[in-house]
Image (tube, helix red, strand yellow):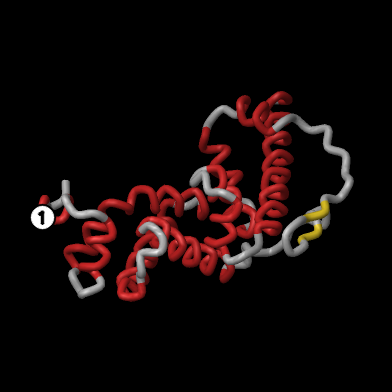
């Protein structure tokens, strides 16, 4: 439970006060948004420890740059973009940004061309419905190369539009669509294999 002095204020009001070096106002923003950001970080990184580290780093970066916040986006949206950049930077440093398949659609400025490859695997929803635990799905998403996993999480967990994802990741909408397509394909392939293996056991 936050301090009533701060909980009654809106996010923009708190941001303006934080911009004048009010740590208490910023602490209230942290309290309000930490759970959602931690959940996003966990989905993207696959590690609770890494998620905590990323969120803390994002909040520190937000505090350092709060004076530049102009209110063009909601505070959560602004913090989310900082967090996504932090996580992608960490994954990039560990080599998890690589392309992993030659079958990826060719990315154009605002569209993509999908390679014609037959796909007779199970429907993703059918596969997901057969998984025993949500942990298996979370693990599969976390192990996607970051360029695909980040788009998938922002679309499926955050429910962002293509344009919102493009803005968050500084890529074109065409690239968003192509990477989302590949993310779903990679997940389908992995989950289908897991279901097949479970059937054999």
Residue 197 x/y as whole percent: 71, 31
* Residue visible at 63% across and 67% down in the picture: 95
Foreground residue, 16 or 89?
16
Residue 41 x/y as whole percent: 45, 54
* Residue visible at 44% across and 62% down in the picture: 83
**SS for callout 1:** helix
106 relative to 21 in the view: left or right: right
201 relative to 158 in the view: left or right: right
* Residue visible at 70% across and 57% down in the picture: 174
Foreground residue, 84 or 164?
164
Displayed quadrant of residue 138: top right
- Mark count: 1
Foreground residue, 90 or 172?
172
Image: 56 above or below 45: below
* Residue visible at 72% across and 34% down in the picture: 192
Displayed quadrant of residue 188: top right
Image: 88 above or below 163: below
- Looking at the rendered image, the quarter that the C terminus falls into is top right
Foreground residue, 126 or 142?
126
Residue under label 1, please give it. Answer: 5
69 relative to 110 in the view: left or right: left
10 Å neighbourhood of mark 1: few (<14), some, or many (≥20)?
Answer: few
Residue 94 x/y as whole percent: 58, 67
Image: 115 above or below 89: above
Residue 160 x/y as whole percent: 53, 48
Image: 192 above or below 11: above
């Amino acid at each position: 439970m936050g301090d009533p002095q701060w909980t009654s204020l809106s996010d923009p009001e708190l941001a303006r006060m934080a911009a004048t070096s009010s740590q208490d106002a910023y602490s209230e923003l942290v309290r309000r948004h930490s759970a959602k950001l931690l959940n996003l970080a966990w989905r993207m990184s696959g590690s609770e420890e890494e998620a905590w580290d990323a969120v803390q780093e994002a909040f520190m970066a937000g505090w350092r740059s709060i004076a530049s916040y102009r209110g063009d986006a909601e505070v959560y949206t602004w913090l989310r973009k900082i967090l996504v950049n932090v996580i992608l930077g960490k994954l990039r440093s560990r080599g998890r940004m690589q392309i992993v398949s030659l079958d990826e659609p060719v990315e154009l400025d605002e569209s993509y061309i999908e390679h014609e490859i037959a796909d007779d695997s199970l429907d993703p929803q059918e596969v997901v419905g057969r998984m025993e635990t949500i942990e298996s799905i979370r693990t599969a998403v976390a192990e996607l190369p970051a360029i695909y996993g980040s788009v998938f999480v922002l679309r499926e967990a955050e429910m962002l539009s293509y344009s919102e994802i493009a803005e968050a990741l500084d890529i074109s909408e065409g690239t968003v669509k192509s990477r989302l397509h590949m993310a779903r394909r990679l997940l389908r392939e992995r989950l289908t294999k897991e279901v097949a293996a479970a059937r054999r056991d």
